[in-house]
């Protein structure tokens, strides 16, 4: 995989997120309370709400528009809601954050 540096883990507060603009669209990068990092498309499958502005709890995020809960691990809506967003491989090396954008491009093809 071709990993692209997007910043430092310190750029994202625990239970927070940052949005990264890419040629494939906006990517939301999340940091959980236990310092796990996840990256998903930054739009809710329901009405396109900005997931990067949602509330992070456990390994999920709640959309700020209509309270849909999205798994950060799978990108799937939880509970009775249906739909999903694409996940993007993310990793931390030392304090640096990386995402693999070609995974997103290949999923679109």
Image (spheres, rainbow, N blue to C red):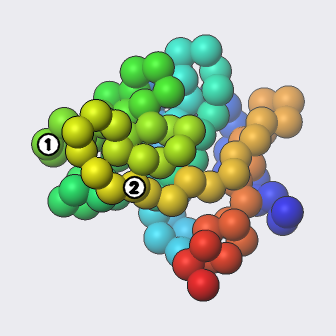
What residue is rendered at 25% in x and 60% in y?
48
Q: Is residue 97 left or right of residue 42?
A: right
Which sits in the foreground, 65 or 20? 65
Disc number placed over residue 99 in the picture, else none? none
Residue 102: give x, y in percent of width and height: 72, 71
What residue is rendered at 43% in x and 31% in y?
60
Q: Residue furthest top?
A: 34
Question: Could you give the CA–CA distance between mark 1 and mark 2, rounded to whole angstroms?
Answer: 15 Å
First along the sequence among labels 1 and 2: 1
> Is residue 47 visible in the rendered structure shown here?
yes
Q: Is residue 1 above or below residue 73?
A: below
Dividing the picture into quarters, in which one does residue 36 lie?
Answer: top right
Dividing the picture into quarters, in which one does residue 69 lie?
Answer: top left
The residue where tag 2 is placed is: 84
Residue 72: give x, y in percent of width and height: 50, 38
Q: Which quadrant is home to the N terminus? A: bottom right
Residue 76: give x, y in percent of width and height: 42, 47
What residue is rendered at 15% in x and 44% in y?
65
Q: Which quadrant is home to the C terminus? A: bottom right
Which sits in the foreground, 76 or 31? 76
């Amino acid at each position: 995989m071709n990993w692209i540096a997007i910043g430092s883990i310190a750029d994202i507060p625990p239970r927070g997120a940052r949005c990264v603009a890419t040629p494939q669209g906006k990517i939301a990068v999340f940091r959980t309370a236990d310092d796990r990092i996840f990256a998903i498309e930054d739009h809710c499958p329901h009405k396109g709400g900005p997931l990067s502005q949602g509330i992070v709890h456990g390994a999920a995020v709640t959309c700020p528009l209509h309270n849909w809960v999205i798994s950060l691990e799978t990108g799937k809506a939880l509970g009775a809601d249906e739909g999903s967003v694409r996940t993007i491989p993310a990793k931390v090396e030392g304090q640096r954050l990386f995402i693999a954008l070609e995974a997103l491009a290949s999923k679109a093809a």
